[in-house]
Amino acid sequence: ARQEQLDLEATPVEQGQAELQKAELEKAQLDMGQAQQLASKAKASAPQEVLVMHLMANKGETIDGQLLLDGVLAAGFRFGGRKIFDRHIGDQGSGEILFSLANVANPGTFDLKTIDQMTTPGVTLFMALDDIEDPVSAFDIMIQSVDSMSAALGLSVLDETRSSITRQTIDHYRQRARDVAFRRSHGQ
């Protein structure tokens, strides 16, 4: 309940213009408030920074499910509730999830009961940098896992665009992890 002052000496036209200006000002303030709300919602729902690598069999070949399972477990992954494999900070599957491994074939999951009978053209490793306490260390562990599995299973390592991964791409991924850690440590 705001009290408004009346300009008793203003003409009806001047009063109309003043009311119109006041209405436009209120609308502009409302628009600014809506814009700020949208901006904060957008920031809250901003896409996460995710690193992706693919381990693929040679063209026309597939990875045997049992060999894949052995390689995944040897690299420290554990089967998780999402029916994919997760690499935790602890080697025995304890602590926070650093990154995960999914099947490139739809629906992207694995069935442990039938994994020894399945084949797949490859797997995808992904890491949500914003969810990890130390993204740079987690990335280094991801690289070790990728190296271990690609060597053991004879797989090609591809980047998020499915191009052969290069030293430059790995350096770029590591920098993305550093950027997330820097933003977090500086409250941005």
Image (cartoon, helix red, strand yellow):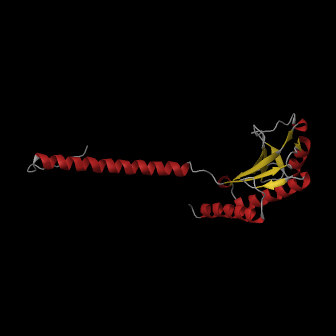
Is 154 on the left or on the right of 50, as rendered?
right
Q: Nearer the viewer, residue 69 or 17?
A: 17
Point 37% across, 48% down: residue: 31
Q: Position of residue 116 (x, y in %)?
A: 91, 38
Q: Nearer the viewer, residue 93 or 75?
A: 75
**Looking at the image, residue 62 lies above or below residue 180:** above
Is 40 on the left or on the right of 159, as rendered?
left
Q: Quadrant of the N terminus?
A: top left
The image shows a total of numbered marks equal to 0
Is 177 on the left or on the right of 101, as rendered?
left
* Residue extending farthest front: 60
Q: Is residue 6 visible?
A: no
Place residue 108 in its image quadrant.
top right
Point 78% across, 43% down: residue: 104
Q: Quadrant of the C terminus?
A: bottom right
Q: Position of residue 181 (x, y in %)?
A: 65, 62
Point 51% across, 48% down: residue: 41
Q: Position of residue 20 (x, y in %)?
A: 22, 47
Q: Is residue 186 visible?
A: yes
Q: Nearer the viewer, residue 158 or 14?
A: 158
Q: Position of residue 136 (x, y in %)?
A: 72, 62
